[in-house]
Amino acid sequence: MISTLLVANRGEIACRIFRTCAELGIRTVAVHSDADGNALHARVADTAVRLPGATPADTYLRGDLVVKAAVSAGADAVHPGYGFLSENADFARAVLDAGLVWIGPPPEAIEAMASKTRAKELMGIAPLAEVTASDLPVLVKAAAGGGGRGMRIVRRLDELGAALESARAEAASAFGDGEVFVEPYLERGRHVEVQILADTHGTVWPLGTRDCSLQRRHQKVIEEAPAPGLPEGLVKELHALAVRAARSVAYVGAGTVEFLVADGRAHFLEMNTRLQVEHPVTEAVSGLDLVAEQIRVAEGHALPLDAPRARGHAIEARLYAEDPARDWTPQTGTLHRLAVPDSVRLDTGYTDGDEIGVHYDAMLAKVVAHAPTRAEALRKLAHALENTTLHGPTTNRDLLVRSLRHEEFATARMDTGFYDRHLTELTVSAPDPHAPLAAALADAHGRSRFGGWRNLLSQPQTKRYLMAGEEHEARYRHTREGLAADGVRVVHADARLVVLDIDGVHRKFEVSRYGDQVHVNNTTLTALPRFPDAKAQLAPGSLLAPMPGTVVRMAEGLAAGAPVEAGQPLLWLEAMKMQHQITAPVTGTLSELRAVVGQQVEPGSLLAVVQAT
């Protein structure tokens, strides 16, 4: 029996595994980088061990340090979570060689399936050895790892070389393995997968299907179980292929076999030899705790011969600290408040007051709804997200709500190109026009004692806010009866709650302020100074960092004075394990270059200036 378990991971998956361990009576050990010294997963574990450094390569990807931490903390088992070392056969062997229990498949199974190229060979599929124009479009893909990192769509042959180089660099940074391969890219397929669970006694369960078609940058955003609208015959085929893949490598534990379904056919993609981010939707419809099942399998327990029957429908949305309207750029800063309605499940690695840094994935949480039908689960999840209190950096919350309510998704006609087609309409900003007034009234509460109302009519008070990139001015007055504004009736106003009568309807505005950042219900504003300081204007063609990150690469020969073409890649930033390309906005001359490789930059930092010709 396992008594103490170390999780070789961080964030929400570590917290989620610790939760099951607490229910099973198993002591827990966390590992943490210096950047994660005060992270939630390090705080909730019974014991925490420091991994010196901040980057993944120095910490969570150092298998030797993780095994040493497990031994020193008295752990007798290691759970890898997902990402990082979860699909690293050498790490699994190191855990076993140290006399510890490995919560995962045998190293040989990981070795066979963790490399997508070897997995395809095992299933009788060969990657493209030579790409011609007739093969386009193609997908460059990292052989190791997942999460959309190291993936590039190529539609022109002259873009292939740069895509290969960029994908190799990103894969090496995220997984410690720069191997990539090329395969055909299917434009309008659905991403469907089968959860499997296998024991050491020869039983393999196919635990239904999941649809994960809504993706950005090849990384899943919304997942559901079961995959809707699949013919019964196709579901049986998917289950059979998944079981075949598991049996071909003598698989043990939880794993996922992924497919692209197009034109009624299933195309094998890969097998993930670990727990998936989206495993909660399978747990919801199956009634299982997959982490508990992983632990029982590792302890040698046998599964019943028959898998449990699915009940109802479950949908999961990944809440990211990112700005979908600005090329999904990751966001950093303080998460002041995160509160989700009790009607849904929340898996998160953050709590109020935590800092969101640049070193790791941008996912804040997973929100999961379960209901008897798909339509009910959709409604439940969209309503919960809409009523989530979320104060801090920009997130994809509004995008998630609109996606769930989009007619194409609601009728289960989505595919992996959903965001390519609909991103613009889904990110159109629609801030509440009354939010600035509510913020101003809350700020003005209690200030009327000194020179507030007057017998003579006076000029209104004004406050300025930045909302959705535009400046807004709120105008109000102090009167004998209290605060007033044109066009509405102020029913109530204090520092936290404003109630306005708008055309006979009472509307409530909950107001929270953190420095200059003001949250009014789901609208975020920035309070502007009454007398702004004069600022020097940026030169035309200035390239500013769109996000915090590290300059990891610059175009060959790039220097001040060099000619550049519009759209030409100039430099690459890396943040939260993703690389972002900075290109020349116009054809001209690089008149100034501030960036250097290895430099840490903040959002808005001047990187370079391109002077148009």
Image: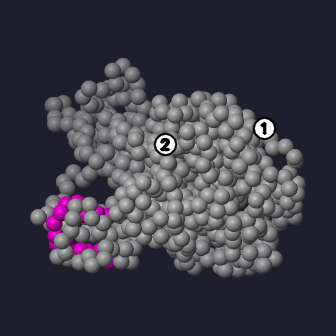
What colouring style does the render use? one colour
Q: Tell me which residue sits at (36%, 25%) in the image.
A: 501
Q: Residue furthest top?
A: 504
Task: Quadrant for the N terminus, please.
Answer: bottom right
Describe residue 195's horizontal placement relative to residue 523 as left or right: right
**Residue 188, numbered circle:** 2
How far from the left and from the top, in percent, is residue 226? 66, 39
Q: At label 2, which amino acid type do we have?
A: Arg
Q: At label 1, which amino acid type do we have?
A: Arg
Q: Is residue 592 magenta?
A: yes
**Residue 335, numbered circle:** none
User: Disc 1 versus disc 2: distance between alpha carbons?
Assistant: 30 Å
Describe residue 294's horizontal placement relative to residue 156 as left or right: right
Task: Quadrant for the C terminus, please.
Answer: bottom left
| 1 or 2: mark nearer the eye | 2
Where disc 2 sits, the SS reads loop
